[in-house]
Amino acid sequence: MRFYDTGEATARLHHFFAHTPNPALKLVAIGVEDSLWRILNAERISTGEWLVTLKARGGAGLLPEVDADKVPELGRAGVVKAVDHMVDVAHRETPGSIVDVARNTAALLMGVYAADREPDAEKRRRILGQDLGDVCKHFRDNVVLKKLEVVTSAGHILARLHPRNKPNEQQRHDLRPVTEDDATFAVSAIGLLLNEFQWTRTSP
């Protein structure tokens, strides 16, 4: 069996397997398990062989490297662990799961950033325990944090994407389901937060 990519290069494969049990995603791993491709189309050609059009799985999973020394100590371990988990999920899970994890990761990152700028210990604890919607509200209401409009907007979009992963919310509000493109955006949004907070190795 021959396997064709969009560049029309060919390679003979002895084995291939679906990366996920959900056949609607049409993902395959080629060579190594984290080399994921999405099947766009498959058709039998005149020679009897299959012509398969593939697309690399977009930017999902491409996050900047976290510099732990730049992350506030009060949330350093949690941030590093959450970003590592985000990368793992981005490579292995469904779009809905990726969006859900991105929402939780954004709440943590934004909460740590905001709490580090709060002198009152009780308020710091409260901020760290907030969900994403409440953290976004805190950013909008805070005199200093409201200047980070890009951060607040990214968080707000992730919060709005989350209900699209719930069938009852889809039906109630006539929402479309979460897509691969949404998942790619969600992971990119986490990268944006890391860069805006200057917690990456490329940050000044």
Image (spheres, rainbow, N blue to C red):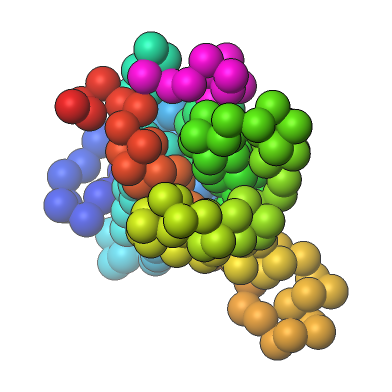
Residue lying at 77% horizontally and 66% vertically, measured from the top left:
166
Q: Position of residue 24 (x, y in %)?
A: 61, 60
Q: Nearer the viewer, residue 22 or 119?
A: 119
Q: Main secondary structure of the magenta part?
A: helix
Up the image or down, 136 lies above or below 64; here it is below
Up the image or down, 167 lies above or below 104; here it is below
Up the image or down, 84 lies above or below 175; here it is above
Residue lying at 26% horizontally and 21% vertically, measured from the top left:
201
Q: Position of residue 149 (x, y in %)?
A: 38, 61
Residue 158 at least partly seen: no
Up the image or down, 108 lies above or below 72; here it is below
Residue lying at 52% horizontally and 29% vertically, measured from the top left:
116
| Quadrant in the picture for residue 162 | bottom right
Q: Position of residue 154 (x, y in %)?
A: 45, 58
Residue 47 at least partly seen: yes
Q: Nearer the viewer, residue 62 or 19?
A: 62
| Quadrant in the picture for residue 77 | top right
| Quadrant in the picture for residue 89 | top right
Q: Position of residue 150 (x, y in %)?
A: 36, 58
In-image side of 172 versus 139 (left or right): right
Taking the view exactly as shown, the residue that stands out farthest to the right is 168
Q: Magenta span covers which residues? A: 70-79
Specify the quadrant that holds the C terminus. Answer: top left
Specify the quadrant that holds the N terminus. Answer: top left
In-image side of 199 versus 109 (left or right): left
Q: Is residue 74 magenta?
A: yes
Residue lying at 44% horizontally and 28% vertically, measured from the top left:
34
